[in-house]
Image (cartoon, rainbow, N blue to C red):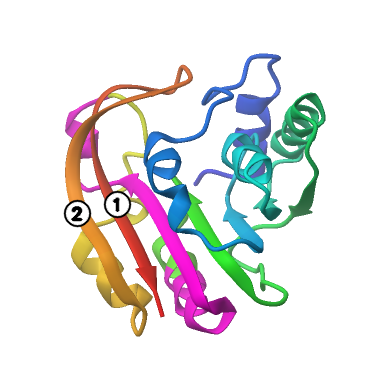
Amino acid sequence: MLDNQYWDERYRTEEYAYGREPNDFLRAEAGRIPPGRVLCLAEGEGRNAVYLAELGHKVTMVDFSVEGLRKAERLARERGVQLNLIHSDLAVFVPDGIFTGVISIFAHIPRAARRRMHARLSQILAPEGVFLLEAYNHRQPSFGTGGPRDPERLMSLEELRLEVSPLRVILGREVERDVREGIYHTGRGATVQIIAAH
């Protein structure tokens, strides 16, 4: 079980474990997110949240690692943006209000917690709001280039289509791509990418 102590240890170094730049899929597709409030789930050290704040969004990020939140705050300060930081486990987190975007980048939480969070999407997304996710799929452990080995934390496109219903899937695919994000995601990887909206 990966707990907050595990993640605090990973994030305690000065180096950013997954880098300081946003995820490639998010960078490519961020233009789909309408202006407004954006929620970043299990956002770690804040690289994606800071990027979205730089684009002008009002960003709330959630993570259960105090060390991750500390580094996110530092990165935001360096980049001259503000983030709303929430210290919480996604297994118990209940989003407050409506968002134009919900972002989940390599948020490999247990399946039951993930399903509960995804079931809330239709209630917390604004009418034109967008849900954007990239995660490792079930083929990733054979690549050995990062991500969890526990199959419960990996995802398939088929599972995600069911979990985000009744949202409409705009883009959904499982792809192999080079992931170069810090020292823990490095090399060829097997990911699932999904964008969904009302």
Left or right, 152 with respect to 89, comes to: left
Q: Which numbered disc flags the more N-terminal residue, 2 or 1?
A: 2
Q: Position of residue 171 (x, y in %)?
A: 26, 60
Please determine whether, in this image, residue 46 is positioned above or below residue 164.
above
Residue at left offset 71%, top offset 77%: 97
- Above-or-below relation of 177 to 2: above
**Residue, x 34% and y 74% (percent of image)?**
163
Decide: is 179 above or below 162. above
In three-dimensional space, the C-alpha distance between marks 2 and 1, rounded to whole angstroms, equals 5 Å
- Between 126 and 103, the one lying in front of the other is 126
Closest to the observer, 92 or 195? 195
- Please tell me whether residue 30 belongs to the stretch shown in magenta: no
Q: Name which residue type carries label 1.
A: Gln
**Drawn side of residue 145 relative to residue 121, left or right:** left
**Residue at 46%, 51% in the rendered image:** 31
Dot 2 surroundings within 10 Å: few (below 14), some, or many (20 or more)?
some
Residue 149 falls in image quadrant: top left
Query: Start and end of the magenta stretch?
Result: 115-144
Disc 2 residue type (three-letter)? Arg
In the drawing, what numbered circle is on residue 173?
2
Residue located at (42% from left, 71% from top): 115
Q: Are marks 2 and 1 in contact (CB under 8 Å)?
A: yes
Q: Position of residue 196 (x, y in %)?
A: 36, 68
Residue of label 1: 193
**Which quarter of the rendering shows the C terminus?**
bottom left
Is residue 138 rendered magenta in the image?
yes
Give the crowd class for mark 1: few <14, some 14-19, many >=20 residues within 10 Å. Answer: many
The percent position of residue 33, horizontal first and vertical second, equals 50, 59
Res 179 quadrant in image: top left
Secondary structure beneath label 2: strand
In the image shown, does 105 or 49 lie closer to the viewer?
49
Q: Secondary structure at mark 1?
A: strand
